Amino acid sequence: MIQTCIRITFEFEVTGWRQQKYLLQKLKKLFQLSRKGRRSAYRLQWVKKFLNYSNRMGEKAKKMLEELSEQEQEIRARLNGQEASSEDQDRLDKIQQARQDLSLYLNDMALFSDQITRRILDGEKIPQAEKIYSIFKPFTCWIVKGKAGILMELGVPVAIIEDEYQFVLGYGIEWEGTDIDMAVPLVQSIEAQYPHLTMTCSFDLGFYSPEVREQLETKTNLVVIGMSKKGRLSKEEKERQNTEEYKEARQGHSRVESCMNVLNHRGMRLIREVSKEGFERVVACTIVAVNIHRLGTLIQQKERKRLRRKEKREKRLRQAA
C-alpha cells in the first residue's frame, strides 16, 4: 500500500509522502520486531505498535484517496464543459486505476488488521474460510502444512483421471473444497464425454470417504476397486484389499504418480498466472501437451517396431540368398 502511495505521489503530485523512505524503513523494522519477538514477553507490545503504525499509514492513504477524488472531479468538470484535452482523459483513466488499487490495499489492510487483533491480541481462532493466503491470488489454498519432505505448499489442487494408455481423460480444478468433493463430479464428467468407456478406477487416499464411495457406486457406472480406506481397516476391508482385483488396480495406480510428474515438467509445477482464467488456461494447455507427447511416443514406438520387423525380414532374405 505504501509503495502504491509513493507511486501516486510522483505521478499525480499528491502531498503527504515526502518521507517515504523513512516510513518504509520504520514499518519494516516494526514488522521484524513483532515477528521475531513471538517468544518474547514484549510480543504483544510490538504487535500493538505495528498495528498502530499501520493504521496511521492507512489514514494517510485515505487522505490521498480524497485528494485523488478531488482531482477526478476537476477533470470531470472540464470534460463536461468540453474544455478538456485527450491528456485529461488519459489522466482520468490513470486516476481511476490508482484509486481502485489503493482501495483494494486499504480493504486488505483493514481485514488483516482485524484478523491479527483477533488472533494474537484476543486469542481467537480464525475460521479457515476467512483466511487469505495471497492478496494477489485470493483463490490460493494451503495444500500442505508440515508434511514430511515438504515444509509448506500453497496453490490450487488439480485432480486428473488417466486411462490405461496414459492419456489424461479429464481434470478438475478444486477452487473450493477438497479431493472428496471433486471425486464424484469428475467421474460423472468423464462418463458424459466417454459413454462407452468401461471404468475401473484406483484413487488416492485423499479421495476416500464412505459417502463418496457409496455415491460412486450408486450414481455412476464406475467399478470402485482401488480405493483405500483411511484409518484402521475392518475385517471386511482387509479381505477386500487382499483380493487380486484390488492388488491389480493398485499396481496400476503408480502410472498416475508418473503422470503427475510429467505434468509438473510440462508447466504445472509453478503457474505464474494471476487470474483464475489464466490458471485454468495453463492447466488445460499442459494437459493437451502431455497427451500430444504421449501420442507422439506411441507413434514412435510403432514406427520403431515396424523398422525392426523390416530389418529382420531383410536379414532373412539376405541369409536365404
Image (cartoon, rainbow, N blue to C red):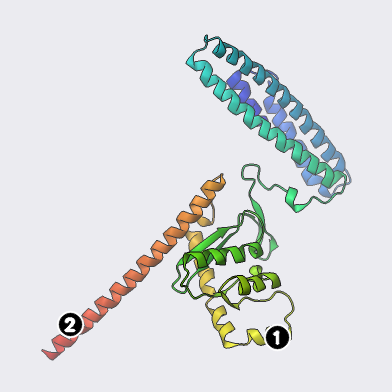
The reply to whether discs 1 and 2 touch (Cβ–Cβ < 8 Å) is: no
Name the spot of residue 317 as percent of width and height, x first: 15, 86
Give the side of residue 314 with respect to residue 47, left or right.
Answer: left
Q: State the image coordinates of residue 3 (x, y, percent, origin top left).
A: 64, 31
Q: Residue furthest left?
A: 321
Q: Quadrant of the C terminus?
A: bottom left
| Residue for point 14% across, 86% down | 318
The quarter holding residue 250 reads bottom right
Q: Quadrant of residue 73?
A: top right
In the foreground, 112 or 81: 81
Image disc number at residue 236: 1
Label 1 vs 2, first from the N-terminus:
1
Q: Which residue is mark 2?
A: 314
Q: In which quadrant of the rendered view does residue 122 lie?
A: top right
Task: Identify the residue at horizontal 61%, vertical 62% (top origin).
Answer: 182
Q: Is residue 85 above or below residue 5?
A: above
Residue at the (87%, 49%) spot, across then down = 123
